[in-house]
Image (spheres, coloured by chain):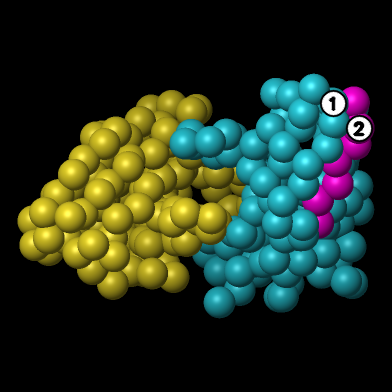
Chain colours: A cyan, B yellow
Amino acid sequence: SQQGEEDPQALSIQEGENATMNCSYKTSINNLQWYRQNSGRGLVHLILIRSNEREKHSGRLRVTLDTSKKSSSLLITASRAADTASYFCATDHTGTASKLTFGTGTRLQVTL
Amino acid sequence: NAGVTQTPKFRVLKTGQSMTLLCAQDMNHEYMYWYRQDPGMGLRLIHYSVGEGTTAKGEVPDGYNVSRLKKQNFLLGLESAAPSQTSVYFCAIKAGVGDTQYFGPGTRLTVL
């Protein structure tokens, strides 16, 4: 399986702090995407970074991609209780008909 | 959920029963996907379609069949349900290669 790995598996922080989660993968990608999933709900797309990009921002989100290390990180700045969710990275691998391979996720808990 | 609907939302089956899950989209996207998500895990691809009349196997296709007779609909069938198929099933759509996937709200299936 090409399933990526995410680190840490769980993260607990206080409101206002930054949260960083990492994703590693094994083979070449077209792009890498991050999704959020609230408990019992569907996945919400957060951000997509293409293989020729190194950094991307969207509001309080910052994503970096290092293709030489086959890794990505998602930074959420000034976290809020509403950011409590599971976060998944998903990789669109070269030559796979645009199928996504998901990591196992990071469970983020933001407390007041 | 970006115009992706799933029917039904919940279902309980007995071992050996059959059922069909429906994914419908109103965005005229070519690519459609069926995933399953088990507790504490990321999504795993069951089957996918790159256009009307086409289907292909994903990572975990055994025990499932699919059809894409109309562009708007992607059906996932379980011919003889097993307890191992207890899971949450998500459908996703995508406009083209390298694009974002948009997910439906999910179907929670329990097989007793």
Quarter-wise, where is residue A2 in the image?
Answer: bottom right
* Residue B93, x across and y down, in percent: 46, 43
Asked whether residue A5 is in view, the answer is yes
Question: Label 2 belongs to which residue?
Answer: A17
* Residue B17, x across and y down, in percent: 8, 56
At a point 48% along the width and 28% down the height, the residue shown is B1
Is residue B89 part of the magenta span, yes or no?
no
Question: Label 1 belongs to which residue?
Answer: A15
* Residue A30, x across and y down, in percent: 71, 61
User: B35 or B73: nearer the eye?
Assistant: B35
- Determine crowd level at label 2: few under 14, some 14-19, many 20+ residues with C-alpha closer than 10 A: few
Whether tag 1 and tag 2 are in contact, CB under 8 A, the answer is: yes
User: B100 or B22: nearer the eye?
Assistant: B22
At a point 36% along the width and 48% down the height, the residue shown is B89
- Determine crowd level at label 1: few under 14, some 14-19, many 20+ residues with C-alpha closer than 10 A: some
Asked whether residue A89 is in view, the answer is no
Q: Is mark 1 on a helix, strand or loop?
A: loop
At a point 65% along the width and 53% down the height, the residue shown is A105
Q: In which quarter of the image is the N terminus of chain A?
A: bottom right
Which chain's residue wears label 1? A
Please provide the residue range marked out in magenta.
A16-22
* Residue A109, x across and y down, in percent: 72, 37
Mark 2 residue type: Glu
